[in-house]
Image: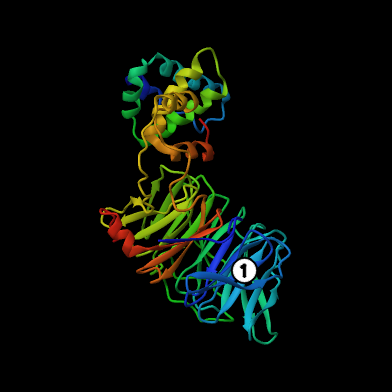
Amino acid sequence: MGALQAVLKNPPISTKNQNVKDRAEGLVLKVLSSFKSTDIEKGVQSLDKNGVDLLMKYIYKGFEQPSENSSAVLLQWHEKALSAGGVGCIVRVLTARKTV
Amino acid sequence: MSYHSFLLEPISCHAWNKDRTQIAMCPNNHEVHIYKKEGSNWNKIHVLKEHNGQVTGIDWAPESNRIVTCGTDRNAYVWTLKGDAWKPTLVILRINRAARCVKWSPKENKFAVGSGSRLISVCYFEQDNDWWVCKHIKKPIRSTILCLDWHPNNVLLAAGSCDFKCRIFSAYIKEVEEKPAPTAWGSKMPFGEVMFESTGTAGWVHGVCFSDSGNRVAWASHDILPFKSDPAQTFLTSETLPLLCVTFITENSLVAAGHDCYPVLFVYDSNKAALSFGGKLDVPKQSAQKGMTARERFQNLDKKATTDSKEAVLESLHKNSISQISILNGGKARCAKFCTTGMDGGMAIWDVKTLESAMKDLKIV
């Protein structure tokens, strides 16, 4: 739980260095997949509104490069984040100019 | 609430006449149809055919009874009623892209046209030459202007555009009016001066509206709904699909509608300087719950991964996105009725009083 907060705390939004963004994305993915399915909902509840938007951005970034099991885990997170953030959250991911 | 379906095509834009008996609208083609309400039917009485491209904006001046239309053919026409027919006058806008929206100023001596050529044309009538002349506002607009609204003082103009900003310009034309008094947005207002520019939104600005006093402005952006009341600026992140149009119904309440097919109320609390969600304004009738057979349940689970018996039919009044809201009675200070038109070719009239009584905790401040 603490790991989720920490990894979402300082997102590399403004950096131009692609490496930094990739490493941050890898870390977030590791944290998300280490959660148990039942704990996912609690994890989403512990985030504030901006946190949910940020989480949704990472989820979509993760969808772009599917690996072995990541898509299933990401879909579970997506469902819970959607019920917390609503459709507006996804619209914000699509319109945001500063990508994670 | 009454709903009337005109045609199957989307209604691109609409405008009402002064006593709200006639509506001019464009059914997504080159023409403007004017319908008159006779009893409970709407009859088509005029068809205005002058544009060569789709008509994107219509505005009907209530006092002087003139209609201005603008379209993708880069022109605007001012129509005056002579006898029983509407006669057009061409206005040369000097733009090289489509015109997107048009609005008469409150005193009806000017109108503004927003266009895709990254500028706003403010047009006024020159008596000597008997001709409409236009002046351009260019800086610092970087993209298409999607929506316009005039301040009640006839000089300030709010414009929302695709470069993610909402700006308030001065459209002061010294040939037709005298110097305006200072307002909450500033006191020096030469033509084209930017009085206010928004920051922070990352989506196209689809709709903009001044409040009745002109001290507040709200705009609907693709991602959120910001609101500025001097000096505070606040916004509300929406949990729904993007909103396309917004209008004030009192000084503190807004109604907005968009891709979600139902209008929504927002209330601004000036003590807390916060905008909050008031409620959905479209309460669908509860249809009788049919019992589900086990087979249906399994089919649902297989097809849609859910055990709900919700059908895929929209329960709101409009069946497609709502693209424009206009106030029918009461003005922006105490609106009693407003009308929405959308991409389903239908027009719905909403009565504020019945909405208030229908939804118990709806409070229109």
Where, quadrant-wise, is the C terminus of chain B in this rendering?
A: bottom left
| Amino acid type of the residue that numbered disc 1 sits on in the rendered structure | His
Q: Secondary structure at mark 1?
A: strand
Left or right relative to B287: residue A74: right
Image coordinates for residue B132, horizontal then vertical, percent:
66, 78
Q: Is residue A6 above or below residue B65?
A: above
Q: Is residue B242 above or below residue B26?
A: above
Q: Say whether residue B128 is visible.
A: yes
Left or right relative to B241: residue B279: left
Residue ID for mark 1: B33
Front residue of B145 and B256: B256
Residue drawn at point x = 28 percent, y = 57 percent: B363
Left or right relative to B236: residue B98: right
> Image quarter for residue B73?
bottom right
**Colour style of the rendered protein structure:** rainbow
Image coordinates for residue B282, horizontal then vertical, percent:
39, 53
Question: The residue marked by circle 1 belongs to what chain?
Answer: B
Residue drawn at point x = 38 percent, y = 47 percent: B236
Would you call the spot at circle 1 few (<14 residues within 10 Å), some (14-19), or many (20 or more)?
some
Residue drawn at point x = 46 percent, y = 63 percent: B339
Residue drawn at point x = 32 percent, y = 20 percent: A2
